[in-house]
Amino acid sequence: MRFRDKVVFVTGGTKGLGKAMAKAFLEEGARVGVNGRSNESVEQFQEEFRDTPARAFACDITDYSRMEAMAGKVVAEWGRVDVLVNNAGIVGPIASAEKTKKTDFDAVIDVNVKGSFYASQIFGRQMIEQGSGRIVSISSQVGLFGGKGFLAYAVGKGALQIMTRSLAFEWGRFGVTLCCVAPGFIKGGMNEGLIRRQPFVDFLSAKTPVGRMANVEELVGIVLFLASDEAQYINGETVVMDGGMTGFDQESLVDFISKGKPRA
Ligand SMILES: NC(=O)c1ccc[n+]([C@@H]2O[C@H](COP(=O)([O-])OP(=O)(O)OC[C@H]3O[C@@H](n4cnc5c(N)ncnc54)[C@H](OP(=O)(O)O)[C@@H]3O)[C@@H](O)[C@H]2O)c1
């Protein structure tokens, strides 16, 4: 029970990967708060975890004052916050950079960057007051090297990595440490619809050195480790969890040199 009596908050924890994280923290003894925008997913979560110390809130992370009120309720009920997972995130429509609508770009940055900062600041102040705390943010492999068609998502996920580094510089001396995880493509969450299409799974598997997409449990395991006491000295770092996808493809270079043409 690595999180016995600890208080954990997972943003966007009502569904998808965040819900899997919330469940795992509960199994490890934590009291867990989550939020999401839709009342329906909040009610479903509360019903599914009704016999556990879990609380779900309908709260948009882009609404600073509602976030403050929600954090106030968490602290009033449980007295502290030990771990924040900045998980809530959206992708936005796929579009080339020159055709991306301003409103779509703004919406993605509002949730993925501003919302994650609001949560970090609001829960971080409580952690500073306590003299301890841990923040784990869910970035993405596109936040490392960028990517086509997802400009706002890539920019926002990159910003999360820099926010993590910057806050680590500022808050380490208060006992508050931070980490990021940059996953590749996971078989769950926002990909739930896509993974029902076998060609999509086959395409991504072929693009990944380990030959498959990541399982939800693999991300959950890393998040729990990074949130745990064992990982406290890892501060400001981004852990890439992508099966080698963002690595340099040496094999095709070798083919190119030896055969005079790139691997098909
Ligand atoms: N799935 C992947 O392969 C993958 C890979 C790399 C990184 N990630 C990252 O992992 C995180 C979780 O993704 P997921 O796949 O689990 O997505 P998901 O299934 O779409 O779940 C997203 C969660 O965030 C909540 N949310 C979205 N906008 C919100 C807002 N403004 N305020 C509060 N809650 C909000 C959603 O609840 P409501 O809809 O009710 O608001 C939902 O609970 C995201 O940051 C994503 O970018 C995912």
Image (cartoon, helix red, strand yellow):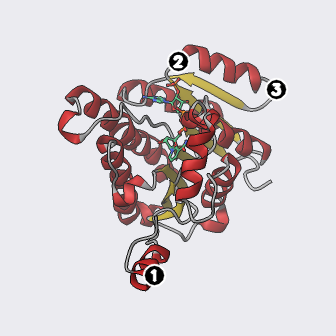
- Whole-number angstrom distance, CA of label 3 to CA of label 1: 56 Å
Q: Is residue 76 left or right of residue 149?
A: right
User: From the Cβ of disc 3, is ligand 1 less than 8 Å away?
Assistant: no
Looking at the picture, does residue 135 appear above or below residue 251?
A: above
Foreground residue among 183 and 113: 183
Mark 3 — residue?
51
Looking at the picture, does residue 21 appear above or below residue 45?
A: below
Mark 1 — residue?
254
- Whole-number angstrom distance, CA of label 3 to CA of label 2: 22 Å
Residue at (61%, 66%) from the top-left corner? Answer: 231
Mark 2 — residue?
38
Give the label, 3 or 2, closer to the camera.
2
Q: Is residue 31 visible?
A: yes
At label 3, the amino acid type is: Asp
Looking at the picture, does residue 34 appear above or below residue 116?
A: above
Residue at (52%, 18%) from the top-left corner? Answer: 38
Where residue 226 sits, quadrant-wise, is: bottom right
The mark total stands at 3
- Across and down, in percent, residue 151 comes to 29, 44
User: From the Cβ of disc 2, is ligand 1 less than 8 Å away?
Assistant: yes
